[in-house]
């Protein structure tokens, strides 16, 4: 039979999957068997939970929490402060003008305390701030309304409010291109500042949207070691391994070739070898989905191009990539 992925990894780290209201049904059996942690792909984002100032919509996230409880799954929270998927009302007043720093801080605190408060004690870790670092250039932080209205300390404040709302939850800074040396140093600088200022932060999330050629194993290793040197835990938060390389922009590929399957399996094998090696600091590894019948990559970065980034295929059967990550000793 097929071994359970999370059982194979029980001495290493939690194994998670991102879910949404559809996959929670269509992939239910697979999720129950192979994963011991779940994350909402979208349903805990600002726009979903808090569409208007005085209205919170917890329907879908509550359902996911009940599923987790019923099946004994842990939950990773994603995400509280992000430049994307945050509604306009949050930054503006009734006339449509940008609000001032004090107003925005107050709104941010209300959002964080309401959302985290509702699930207090039930979510083991939260991505408090997502993708705040700029990808290139001199600037440390990306341009955003959070930054422009509040100033650089919007990040400190978010962590402080989060810690107050649920003192037990492990609080994470989460980002992509996290293994790129230039961005790695910026993330390191940002988080080191937080640690030095005694801001309550407990971990760094590596999104791990990886592909056939990037990042290199060395760059991943260096990123893990650099982040771990801050004395924080590490989570892999959104792992998927595209069957294309970074330069491949073809949109007409309708089926995975054997070559793609083998190349991906080799990548997965080495990625997991590396993650196991660092399991003293890596406490959780979450895939950004569960099986190839649904992935956000089928629209990103190339619109309309299918992708097959997981270790289970469209019929929820284990792929070569699965066997390469469970066969080790
Ligand atoms: C993606 C979801 O998968 C999509 O369904 C949605 O349309 C956009 O967001 N980094 C993150 C995730 O932190 O929240 C993103 O999720 C993928 C990139």
Image (tube, helix red, strand yellow):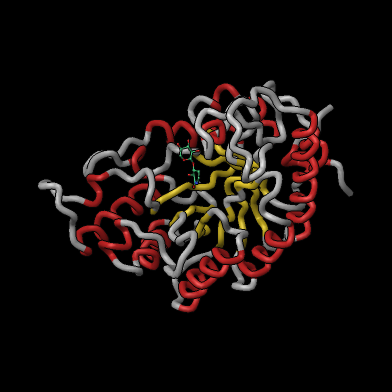
Name the quadrant of the N terminus: top right
Task: Give the image location of residue 327, x and y in percent.
Answer: 86, 42
Task: Give the image location of residue 117, x and y in percent.
Answer: 38, 50
Is residue 121 shown above or below 189? Answer: above
Residue at 61% over, 25% down: 252
Give the camera-side residue of 55 and 298: 298
Furthest residue to the bottom?
196
Locate residue 83 relative to residue 191 in the image: left or right. left
Task: Give the image location of residue 212, x and y in percent.
Answer: 70, 44
Locate residue 3 relative to residue 290 in the image: left or right. right
Is residue 127 shown above or below 315? Answer: below
Is residue 290 shown above or below 46? Answer: above
Task: Give the image location of residue 94, x and y in percent.
Answer: 12, 46
Locate residue 120 relative to residue 57 in the image: left or right. right
Furthest residue to the right?
329
Residue at 79% over, 29% down: 258
Residue at 72% over, 35% down: 311
| Residue 174 visible in this rendered orientation of the protein | yes
Locate residue 60 relative to residue 283 in the image: left or right. left
Q: Quadrant of residue 34?
A: top right
| Residue 171 visible in this rendered orientation of the protein | no
Residue at 64% over, 70% down: 226
Furthest residue to the left?
95
Q: Quadrant of residue 188?
A: bottom right
Is residue 302 shown above or below 219? Answer: above
| Number of numbered tags placed on the structure image | 0
């Amino acid at each position: 039979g097929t071994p359970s992925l999370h059982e194979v990894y029980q001495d290493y780290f939690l194994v998670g999957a991102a879910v949404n209201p559809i996959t929670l049904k269509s992939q239910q059996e697979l999720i129950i068997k192979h994963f011991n942690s779940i994350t909402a792909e979208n349903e805990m984002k600002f726009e979903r939970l808090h569409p208007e100032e005085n209205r919170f919509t917890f329907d879908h996230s509550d359902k996911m929490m009940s599923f987790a409880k019923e099946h004994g799954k842990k939950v990773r929270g994603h995400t509280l402060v992000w430049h994307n998927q945050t509604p306009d009302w949050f930054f503006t007043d009734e006339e449509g003008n940008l609000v001032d720093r004090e107003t925005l801080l107050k709104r941010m605190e209300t959002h964080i305390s309401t959302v985290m408060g509702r699930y207090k004690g039930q979510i083991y870790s939260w991505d408090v701030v997502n993708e705040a670092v700029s990808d290139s250039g001199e600037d440390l932080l990306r341009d955003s309304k959070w930054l422009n209205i509040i100033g650089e300390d919007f990040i400190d404040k978010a962590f402080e409010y989060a810690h107050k709302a649920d003192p037990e939850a492990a609080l994470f800074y989460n980002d992509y291109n996290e293994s790129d040396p230039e961005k790695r140093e910026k993330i390191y600088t940002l988080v080191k500042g937080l640690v030095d200022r005694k801001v309550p932060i407990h971990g760094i999330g590596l999104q791990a949207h990886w592909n056939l050629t990037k990042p290199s194993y060395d760059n991943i290793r260096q990123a893990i070691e650099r982040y771990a040197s801050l004395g924080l835990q590490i989570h892999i938060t959104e792992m998927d391994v595209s069957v294309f390389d970074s330069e491949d922009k073809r949109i007409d590929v309708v089926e995975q070739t054997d070559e793609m399957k083998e190349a991906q399996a080799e990548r997965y094998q080495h990625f997991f070898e590396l993650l196991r090696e660092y399991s003293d600091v890596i406490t959780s590894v979450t895939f950004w989905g569960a099986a190839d019948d649904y992935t956000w990559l089928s629209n990103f970065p190339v619109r309309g191009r299918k992708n097959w980034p997981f270790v289970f295929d469209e019929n929820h059967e284990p792929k070569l990539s699965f066997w390469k990550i469970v066969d080790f000793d």
